[in-house]
Structures are given as structure tokens and as C-alpha cells.
Image (tube, grey):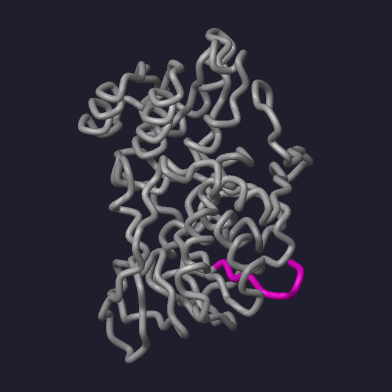
């Protein structure tokens, strides 16, 4: 947390992944800190069948078009004078890059974004339009991420990590906080899991305010490293991953880290073995309802895997 003031969280890195100790108070503090700088997005009813009420949290209407700006704004507000003088650095294929660029511009500091060469040209230009410097490194996101420490050492900038940063996770958690405040009767919440910042931060806020709520983190079966990591007891690549390009052109790789949320368990439903869990389509991301059912999907599209919070320890 170099260059930060009053972070109020502890970060430690034992074998097996980075552990972030974050409380609901951190999320609430982030909510107050970024109020007026981000847009509270609505929960809109969606008719996806099944006869159950479902609402979608429209973070696509957020500034820069993504929830990523929440974490970036919170992290930027915790920079001290020295951190602002040095500027910040981040690695991203697009959404986090735009969030950091906007937050840095409003904070009056400079931002350097390391992006892969195959990043969307539209997003690269959007980051530059927000005033950030872009350095294209590596063929894909994995290579750009590996080059980040070298570039950071050369520039001496403060790092704003896209998910392994407690300030960023607390900022992303304001999504869950807004859901809990707007719909206190919600029974289940479905959240997409990539790096894990949104899912973990939101789960912490939701479980603190609504202890009875069930939170499901979802990944497609074609790329489910979180499920594979929990089964193996440590970070590993998913055996079902197909090395196909993501929307931004980067390949997906294991990016999960363990956190201090002690109530997480993982389960999935596969073709070879049934696991006791309800699954949901990843297209129903950020949706909340009383019950979530997995829609029928073609064999090629794959099925979804669930990271579920409960009262049991993993």
C-alpha cells in the first residue's frame, strides 16, 4: 500500500495467493468517499423466464461503461501527496484502464496504462482521450501483466491493481452495497467472477447487511479457473480452459486470489459429475432474484459454474 493514506486494511501474501482482509466498513467508507464521483446505477426488472422476479444491475450505464471506475476512484482518493506526485500505473485490456485514466485525470495526477498489443483499438484510444499514457506491451494480457513490475520499477509509479488491491475491491463492493440498500428483500445475487474484485467486495457488503442472502459467483464451464483452484486447494489453471480470445482479444488465465472472506465454497455442475449446487448463466451477471435456475444451453456454449457464499468454511 505504498503511497496510500489511511487504507485501513491489511495485505499479506502467503503461499497460495494474496490474502486481502477487507470488512464491510471498508466498503461503506469507499461508498462515502466516491459519492458524487460515480453514478448509482439502477436495478432494472428483466424478463428472462422461469416465473421468478429478476433484476439486473446496469453497470453498463456507469461512467466509462463499467463498474471498474468505482475501484479506481476509491484507490485514487487514498493516494497521498507523494503518490500523486509520482503518478499511477495499471495494467488492463480496457475497462480498468479507462477507470484509472478518468480517476487520475480528476485527481490531478498522471496515469500510465500498460495494455497488450491486441487490446481493442477503441479502448486504447478511449484511454488516451482521458489523458493517460498508454504503453503497449506483450501479445496478450498475460504478457502485459508479466511486464508490469519491470515498467513500474522503471517509472516509480504507484500501482493500482485491477483486483488484488484492497482499495479497489472495497470500491467494487459498492455495487453490492447499492443492491442491498435498494432491495433489502433480495434472496439471491449472481455476480460474474473474473479477477474476483467485484464478487468479493460485493459479497462482503451483501452478507454484512443481509446475512440471509446467497451470493453466487459464476464462470462459464469453458473458463472456470476459480472452481479448479478451490478443488486443488491452491491457484491453478482450469483444465477446461479453451485458449480462445476474450472480448478484448486477450487470453484468459488464472487470476484468482484467496481473500479473507471466510464463507466461500465452490461447486459446479459438469457433464461427468453432478455437484450439489444451483448454477446460473453468466449472461445473468449482477442479477438478483429469489431463486436462480440455469437455462438450457447448447453443448458448445458450455454451462456455468458457481462460487457460492454460505455459512460453512471452505
Is 245 in front, or is 82? 82
The image quadrant of residue 5 is top right
Is 312 in front, or is 78? 78
Residue 56 falls inside the magenta stretch: no
In the rendered view of the protein, which quadrant contains the C terminus? bottom right
Q: Residue furthest left?
A: 122
Q: Position of residue 137 (x, y in %)?
A: 39, 20
Q: Is residue 46 above or below residue 100?
A: below
Q: Which residues are magenta?
A: 307-314
Q: Is residue 80 above or below residue 68?
A: above
Magenta segment, principal secondary structure?
A: loop
Q: How many tags in the picture?
A: 0
In the rendered view of the protein, which quadrant contains the N terminus? top right
Q: Residue at x 58, y 77 (%)?
A: 213
Q: Position of residue 290 (x, y in %)?
A: 47, 84
Is 284 in front, or is 211? 211
Q: Residue at x 66, y 48 (%)?
A: 26
Q: Is residue 122 left or right of residue 103?
A: left
Q: Position of residue 279 (x, y in %)?
A: 47, 77
Q: Residue at x 52, y 22 (%)?
A: 148
Q: Position of residue 93 (x, y in %)?
A: 37, 34
Q: Is residue 97 left or right of residue 122?
A: right
Q: Is residue 49 left or right of residue 103?
A: left
Q: Is residue 219 above or below residue 60?
A: below
Q: Residue at x 45, y 27 (%)?
A: 143
The image quadrant of residue 308 is bottom right
Q: Is residue 274 above or below residue 120?
A: below
Amino acid at each position: 500500500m505504498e503511497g496510500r493514506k489511511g487504507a485501513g486494511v491489511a495485505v499479506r501474501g502467503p503461499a497460495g495467493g494474496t490474502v486481502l482482509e477487507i470488512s464491510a466498513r471498508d466498503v461503506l467508507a469507499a461508498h462515502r468517499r466516491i459519492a458524487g464521483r460515480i453514478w448509482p446505477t439502477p436495478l432494472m426488472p428483466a424478463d428472462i423466464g422461469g416465473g421468478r422476479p429478476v433484476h439486473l444491475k446496469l453497470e453498463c450505464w456507469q461512467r466509462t461503461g463499467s463498474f471498474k471506475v468505482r475501484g479506481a476512484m476509491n484507490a485514487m482518493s487514498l493516494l497521498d501527496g507523494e503518490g500523486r506526485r509520482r503518478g499511477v500505473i495499471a495494467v488492463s485490456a480496457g475497462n480498468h484502464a479507462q477507470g484509472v485514466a478518468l480517476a487520475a485525470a480528476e485527481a490531478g495526477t498522471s496515469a500510465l496504462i500498460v495494455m497488450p498489443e491486441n487490446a481493442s483499438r477503441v479502448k486504447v484510444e478511449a484511454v488516451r482521450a482521458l489523458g493517460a499514457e498508454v504503453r503497449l506491451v506483450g501479445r496478450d494480457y498475460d504478457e502485459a501483466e508479466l511486464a508490469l513490475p519491470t515498467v513500474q520499477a522503471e517509472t516509480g509509479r504507484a500501482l493500482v491493481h485491477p483486483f488484488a488491491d484492497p482499495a479497489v475491491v472495497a470500491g467494487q463492493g459498492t455495487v453490492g452495497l447499492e443492491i442491498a440498500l435498494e432491495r433489502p428483500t433480495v434472496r439471491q445475487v449472481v455476480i460474474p467472477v473474473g479477477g474476483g474484485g467485484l464478487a468479493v467486495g460485493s459479497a462482503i457488503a451483501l452478507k454484512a447487511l443481509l446475512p440471509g442472502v446467497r451470493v453466487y459467483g459464476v464462470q462459464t464451464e469453458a473458463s472456470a479457473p476459480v472452481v479448479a483452484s478451490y478443488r486443488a486447494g491452491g491457484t491453478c489453471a482450469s483444465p477446461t480452459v479453451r485458449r480462445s480470445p476474450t472480448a478484448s482479444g486477450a487470453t484468459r488465465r488464472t487470476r484468482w486470489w484467496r481473500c479473507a472472506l471466510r464463507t466461500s465454497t465452490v461447486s459446479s455442475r459438469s457433464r461427468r459429475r453432478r455437484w450439489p449446487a444451483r448454477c446460473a448463466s453468466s449472461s445473468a451477471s449482477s442479477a438478483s432474484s429469489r431463486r436462480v435456475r440455469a437455462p438450457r444451453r447448447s453443448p458448445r456454449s458450455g454451462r456455468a459454474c458457481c462460487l457460492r457464499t454460505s455459512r460453512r468454511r471452505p
